[in-house]
Image (tube, grey):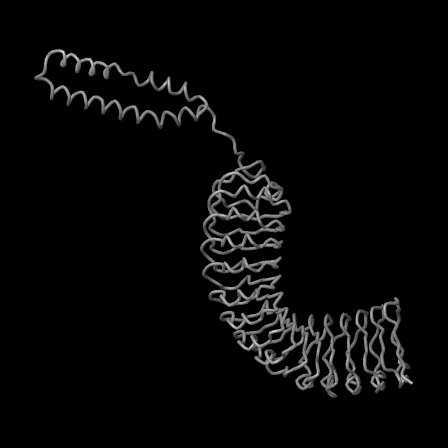
Amino acid sequence: MRVIIYLHTNNLSSTIPTKIGNLKSLVNLALNTNQLSGSIPTTLGDLTNLTTLYLHLNNLSGTIPKELGNIHELTELILSNNQFSGYLPQNICGSGSLTNFSVGSNHLSGPIPKSFKTCTRLFRVRLEGNQLTGNISEDFGVYPSLNFIDLSNNQLYGQISPNWGLSPNLTTLLIAGNNLTGSIPTEFGNATQIHELDLSSNGLVGAIPKEFGGLTSMVKLMLDGNQLSGRVPSELKSLTDLEYLDLSANEFNDSIPSFVGDFQKLHYLNLSNNKFSQAIPFQLAKLIHLSQLDLSFNAVEGQIPPDIRNMQSLEILNISHNNLSGFIPTSFEDMHWLSYVDISYNDLEGPLPNNKAFQAATQEALQGNKGLCGNTRFLQPCNKQTPKKDHKLVFMIIFPILGALALLAFIFALVAKRKKKHQHGENTNMNEEISFSILKFDGKTMFEEIVKATEDF
């Protein structure tokens, strides 16, 4: 008779009884999502017919007993979100039967078990959030059935193996927060079913392989926090299902690729802390579902595209520490979902848009620009010039013009007088009248009349 025990999500406390090892016919044991404490009894290794063991989301501690490696029928071992410490048992997958193995979010340390390399039936693996060590290119093998693997936030090192491209069913590969080096293998282009790839916060170098253009099922791509460089390859334009793209904190250069505007499903885009230059592509305005955009700490120049108003879903915008110039488009006033902006350290000028995000911006989010004004205590108000200043401006413009006109008239009269001195007296009288008129010209009186006529200039 097969025995199944499902006691998950029942607020059970205390420890797992050692006598549970007497249930030789036990096939499935689910004690997850409770408040169990203590260690795993070694007697569980006597349950030779056990196929699934769920102990995740408890307060269990101690080491994972090596006796679990004796359960040759075990296909699913889920121990994540506990307080386990010590090394993983080297024989944890000695039988090669494991398909689902999860020990994520514990305090495990030490090397990856050697039995992992030949555990070819693995379908889902979670080792994230520990202090596991080892060379990632040597400790893992080829897994034809692998669908999901998370190795993030450990202390793994070495180069990424091209073997990951030999898992045709792989949809999720997460190796963020380790000490990986070298370049990204071009063989990744063979994993055409991959939906989520996270290689962030490592020490990867080189360019993004153009073979990434074949990963047309990609939804989330995170390569931030590395030392990747060069241009973003144009082959990436085929990733039209992307919803989340983070290339920040690298050394990418040249212009921001305009084809990003064709990622119509994108809701998060972070290209900050790179060496992007030239203008912001106007095509980005087509990202109508984008909620967060960060282009800060680059060398982007030119004006902010006025068509940005089409990004009606945008909530957070950071374009600080660039070389943007000109006026901020008034079209921001139509962006009602925008709640946060940072435009600091550019060359922007003129009034802030009448938008809640700009009006509520902190001093830090506005500083470092040369001529911003607006109804905020951090900026000068955008008032019109006083009449006194207007008069001074008129004087500065009109007086040189009047002087030039007077000088031209005098020269004209003088030349005309010399040319026509042989003519009759009536012509001479005419020249005298012209000269007399010029001498009677009162610039000050005319200037006062101009000021009076341009009082509202």
Q: Point out the image quarter for the C terminus.
A: top left
Extreme residue in the left direction: 422
- Above or below residue 385? Residue 59 is below
Relative to residue 415, is residue 21 drawn left or right? right
Nearer to me, 363 or 314: 314
The location of residue 19, given as percent across then percent down, is: 91, 82
Q: Quadrant of residue 154?
A: bottom right
The location of residue 351, given as percent across then percent down, is: 52, 38
Nearer to me, 193 or 53: 193
Tally of numbered tags: 0
The location of residue 34, given as percent across then percent down, is: 85, 68
The location of residue 335, given as percent across then percent down, is: 61, 45
- Residue at left offset 49%, top offset 54%: 281
- Residue at left offset 47%, top offset 28%: 385
- Residue at left offset 55%, top offset 72%: 214
Relative to residue 274, is residue 151 drawn left or right? right
Q: Point out the image quarter for the N terminus.
A: bottom right
